[in-house]
Image (spheres, rainbow, N blue to C red):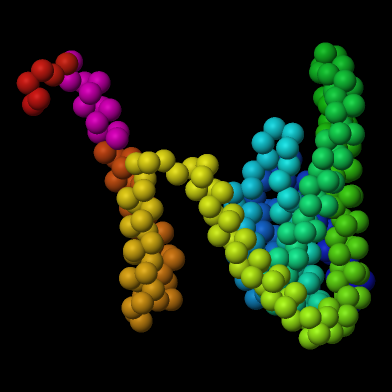
Amino acid sequence: MELLQILMLAIATFIFAIDQFSLTEVIYRPIVACPIIGLILGDLQTGLLVGGTYELMMVGNMPVGGAQPPNAVLGGVVAMVFAIKADMGIDAALGTAVIFSVFGQYAVTLTFTVMSGLMAKADQAAIKASKKGIRNVNMLSMLLLGTLFALMSILAYVGGSAAAKPLQEFAANFSWVMGGLDAAGKMMKYVGFAILLKIMLSNDLWGIYLAGFAAAALLGNVDATRGATLVLVAFIGVALAINNFVTAVQIRNNGSNSGGMSDGI
């Protein structure tokens, strides 16, 4: 059973690694990948909880040029292994995973470094209009990246399983360390969302941003709506977005068809 889990985890991680740059660029996100890993490891519920929380932590981490942020794929794998196989709390597992996600960052940087020396072959293939040559370079890049991540996922599984008992003893003897990891895991989700807001939020959206908090607080404290708070707030956001879009289209159309208006009518 463990060998089957290791094989399936390696295959899934191989696909997630490639998906970061070459496929859908959606499957590798923690909110999708962690539930899949949870199914492989036999705990879908933990996969959903870890995936949703880790997505908030990673939502603002975007690569800029050649600079790579801590990797969401390997971090998700490690968090799932620690949460399920090592029986760590979800927040503590996420706090630990951030440390290991740096190794995924190194794997991506290493792949990019190796492939930069082979781009001349892709250029030559493009000059010759050789589809096969260009495809081979891309396939080599995906094979290298996927293999590195698959190997690291196997190491994470084996290491997490072997470390289960020592981690439990460590948590019992040094609860303050695990408490710190737990606090870090809880904090990181807000840091990730803050990074995203710093990139996306504009001054004219502060009113909608604060209204969303107010709507969540109100709906979350009513018994009839508490279970669907996020969905209802999302519906409100969609309604505002549609209204803003329709209004903008009407203003644009009226402006282009008016032929110039000086009396304000």
In the image, what residue occupies the spot 71% across and 46% down?
Answer: 69
Q: Quadrant of the N terminus?
A: bottom right
In the image, what residue occupies the spot 89% across and 43% down?
Answer: 144
Residue 62, given in percent of the width and then of the height, sits at 64, 43
Q: Quadrant of residue 95?
A: bottom right
Residue with the most extreme top position = 127
Query: In the depicted view, which residue is nearer to us: 210 or 119?
Result: 210
Query: In the depicted view, which residue is nearer to us: 164 or 15?
Result: 164
In the image, what residue occupies the spot 88% across and 80% down?
Answer: 166
Query: In the depicted view, which residue is nearer to us: 233 or 162?
Result: 162
Q: Quadrant of residue 188?
A: bottom right
Q: Is residue 44 above or below residue 70?
A: below
Q: Is residue 92 left or right of residue 193?
A: right
Is the magenta region chiefly helix, strand or loop? Answer: helix
| Residue 142 seen anywhere in this rendered image of the structure | no
Residue 110, given in percent of the width and then of the height, sits at 87, 40
Residue 81, given in percent of the width and then of the height, sits at 79, 70
- Which contiguous range is marked in magenta? 248-259
